[in-house]
Image (spheres, rainbow, N blue to C red):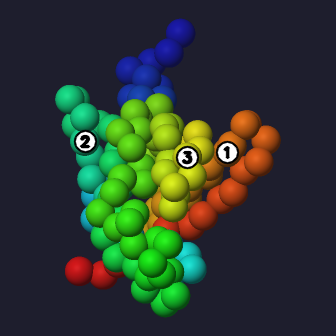
Amino acid sequence: MMTARGFRCLAAIGVASLLSVPTALAASPVGIWEIEMRDSRYSVELCGAAGTALCGTLIWLGNGADSPDNLPYLNTLMIDHAPQTGPNTWKGDLHIYGQSAAGTITQVSEDQITLRGCVFGIICKTYQMYRMAD
């Protein structure tokens, strides 16, 4: 039979173990992000009726990407209303310079997002995006 003192000790251990469990990333994906090649920047925001989908608009081209072929994509959606599928994860269509792919967007830290797009489910490419300083 457990004594009151034993119960309090067990309860204290339980609370301490809960406090030591890592919590999910609480950072917001909202902001300005630059792709790893440093040739394009995107404004990322929460969108959709519930405000939980992810949208990302191409807002800047430079370092060689600002060619006549790419300029028509300026101010268009790259991440197109991707619904949230879990903590810090969204899935939806990615539009990159006229090509569309099924994509997964994962915020891996406060300042890094991983984009993975696949065409036909077999040809995949992964990009890193980094938060721009305010």
Q: Residue 104 at x, y = what percent?
A: 55, 44
Horizontal side, residue 47 vs residue 86: left or right? left
Q: Secondary structure at mark 2?
A: strand
Residue shown at 56% from the left, 67% from the top: 128
User: Which numbered disc covers residue 30?
Assistant: none
For the residues marked 3 and 2, what is the alpha-carbon distance in whole angstroms?
19 Å
Of all residues shown, which one is farthest toward the top?
A: 1
On the image, the x and y values in percent for residue 64 come to 52, 88
State the mark number for residue 100: 3
Question: Vertical placement of 39 versus 84: above or below?
Answer: below
- In-front residue for pair 47/24: 47
Q: Local crowd at mark 3 within 10 Å, few (<14), some, or many (≥20)?
A: some
Residue picked out by circle 1: 118
The residue to which callout 2 is attached is: 47
Q: Quadrant of residue 76?
A: bottom left
Q: Amino acid at mark 2?
A: Cys
- The first of marks 3 and 2 along the sequence is 2
Residue type marked 1: Cys
